[in-house]
Image (spheres, helix red, strand yellow):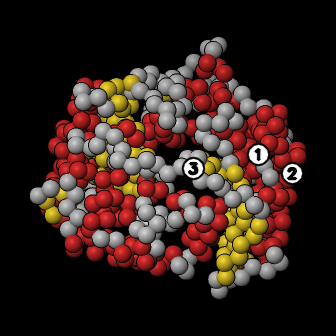
């Protein structure tokens, strides 16, 4: 049977072990009309070897990935894609909101929201006008573990766009009017979250698991902490936000390796070589089973459950991904959807996912349903957790999961931005330079015995941490 292969080859860079996004300016018409697409064609039958290992009829990839180092010594991954005159750059800096202090939680998110609100000699309007003139789009965001920087630039204006990005990263103005504007937006989001059951469930869930650790704090902070943040706090948080020894960088687009190295140096000139503060120690997670109910007068309750998961570096993580697709990650084809929605009509949707937080990996899920149905829904979820732990999966379930997970893999690479995101993640999690070539083969090699072994080791239906927000009945 013919197999699908990618016609384009990648050249790349080195692999190292280890919010709301704020956008600078509307993307100009020339840039908005352009996007990178991977061209997929039917090829001859797969030869014996690595590609054949992926299995007949599955998508196989053949990528040349090499490391690059900029003249100033910054390691990055590079993909030359000359088909469309766009260059995308993305960087992850480990740290993120966990570097906030308890009293000033939310400072890192405010910092990232202010980077394009004026830099150097340009106030917010002048900065936006310059980005618009260059047809450049910048993104700055923060999460619990890291801050992210992204840029999309026209190839013939890439160096000028990178220079403007560097101003935002190294010379933010933190003007008083901009601070209050972004602070007001943050406070509005926090206020909206106070009546949103999903937000409240997540906050209670993380607080219950992580106690006093920074992971327990809301990334956006609280109304009290955000109101108390001063300009001096923002300057201090900015100094903690980015350091090259915690950076993972990728450049993709119509740019060769030499020019990409100069681009990286331009973008990150002046960024500290070494971090000024250490990352917090991993949390000691509370794994005690129990149900916490947060009273909120709404007709439907939100339930979040979870337990300890797997680090991304765990050899069984890929097996866990296949198992989770069958249990709760596969949409309408998952067991949870079949039992909770299709057979019993208890909820519109239910899902589970792996969340490999640094030092605190989780396996979590959520469901929302009428107050009087939440108890029965939880019971069915526990039963399915238990059934997977005891019985594993069938050959038919495994084959269906493998077909989807290998076939859908190509969809992760249909734009410059998605490719840079993958390359950054591959660096961060030490997946190996050839992982993209090997991934489908590894997934097709998973057996029902592998899943049974992992499920028995990992799943603990009687030790789930559970949070319910609403007015649940039957618990």
Q: CA distance from mark 3 to mark 1?
A: 20 Å
Q: Is tag 3's residue or tag 1's residue first in the polypeptide sequence?
A: 3
224 sits left or right of 268 in the view: right
Give the side of residue 103 with respect to residue 372, left or right. left
Q: In front: mark 1 or mark 2? A: 1
- Kindly tell me whether residue 357 is visible in this rendering: no
In terms of secondary structure, where does tag 1 sit?
Answer: helix
Among the two numbered marks 2 and 3 on one chain, the one whose residue lies closer to the N terminus: 3
Tag 2: Cα neighbours inside 10 Å, few (<14), some, or many (≥20)?
some
Q: Is the residue 297 above or below the residue 42 in the image? A: below
* Residue 271 placement: quadrant: top left
Q: Residues within 10 Å of mark 1 (few under 14, many from 20)?
A: some
| Residue at (55, 80) in percent of width and height | 195
In the rendered view, tell whether residue 195 sits above or below residue 50. Answer: below
- In the rendering, which numbered label is found on residue 158? none
Say which quarter of the image contains residue 292: bottom right
Residue that mark 2 sits on: 387
Residue at the limit of the structure toward the left, as seen here: 121
Marks 1 and 2, how far apart at CA:
13 Å
* Residue at image coords 64%, 13%: 48
In x, y percent, where is residue 238? 31, 56
Which is in the foreground here, disc 2 or disc 3?
Answer: 3
Which residue in the structure is indicated by mark 3?
Answer: 282
- SS at mark 3 in the image: loop
Q: CA distance from mark 2 to mark 3?
A: 31 Å
From the top left corner, tell me how far across and down residue 435 is, in percent.
Answer: 55, 28
């Amino acid at each position: 049977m013919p197999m699908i292969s990618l016609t384009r080859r990648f050249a790349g860079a080195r692999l190292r072990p280890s919010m709301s996004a704020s956008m600078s300016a509307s993307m100009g018409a020339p840039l908005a009309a352009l996007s990178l697409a991977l061209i997929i064609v039917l090829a001859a039958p797969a030869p014996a070897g690595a590609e054949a290992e992926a299995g007949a009829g599955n998508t196989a990839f053949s990528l040349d990935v090499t490391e690059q180092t900029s003249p100033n010594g910054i390691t990055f991954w590079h993909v030359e894609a000359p088909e469309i005159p766009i260059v995308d750059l993305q960087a992850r800096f480990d740290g993120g909101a966990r570097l906030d202090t308890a009293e000033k939680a939310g400072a890192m998110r405010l910092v990232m929201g202010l980077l394009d609100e004026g830099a150097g000699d340009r106030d917010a309007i002048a900065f936006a006008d310059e980005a618009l003139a260059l047809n450049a789009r910048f993104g700055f965001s923060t999460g619990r573990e890291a801050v992210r920087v992204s840029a999309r630039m026209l190839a013939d204006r890439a160096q000028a766009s990178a220079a403007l990005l560097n101003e935002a990263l190294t010379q933010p103005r933190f003007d008083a009017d901009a601070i209050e504007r972004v602070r007001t937006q943050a406070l509005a989001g926090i206020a909206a979250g106070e009546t949103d059951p999903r937000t409240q469930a997540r906050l209670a869930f993380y607080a219950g698991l992580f106690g006093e650790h920074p992971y327990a704090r809301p990334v956006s902070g609280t109304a009290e902490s955000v109101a108390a943040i001063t300009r001096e706090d923002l300057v201090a948080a900015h100094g903690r936000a980015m350091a090259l020894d915690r950076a993972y960088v990728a450049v993709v687009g119509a740019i060769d390796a030499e020019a990409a190295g100069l681009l990286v140096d331009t973008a990150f000139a002046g960024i500290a070589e070494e971090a000024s503060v250490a990352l917090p120690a991993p949390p000691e997670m509370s794994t005690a089973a129990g149900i916490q109910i947060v009273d909120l007068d709404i007709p439907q309750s939100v339930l979040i459950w979870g337990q300890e998961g797997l680090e991304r570096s765990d050899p069984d993580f890929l097996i866990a991904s296949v198992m989770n697709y069958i249990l709760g990650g596969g949409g309408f084809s998952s067991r949870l959807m079949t039992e909770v929605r299709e057979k019993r009509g208890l909820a519109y949707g239910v899902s589970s996912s792996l969340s490999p937080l640094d030092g605190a990996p989780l396996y979590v899920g959520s469901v929302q349903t009428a107050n009087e149905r939440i108890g029965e829904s939880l019971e069915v979820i526990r039963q399915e957790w238990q059934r997977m732990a005891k019985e594993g999966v069938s050959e038919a379930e495994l084959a269906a999961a493998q077909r989807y997970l290998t076939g859908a893999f190509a969809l992760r690479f249909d734009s410059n931005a998605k490719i840079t995101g993958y390359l950054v993640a591959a660096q961060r999690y030490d997946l190996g330079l050839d992982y993209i070539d090997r991934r489908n083969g590894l997934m097709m090699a998973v057996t029902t015995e592998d899943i049974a072994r992992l499920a028995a080791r990992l799943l603990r239906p009687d030790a789930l941490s559970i949070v319910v927000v609403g007015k649940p009945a039957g618990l």
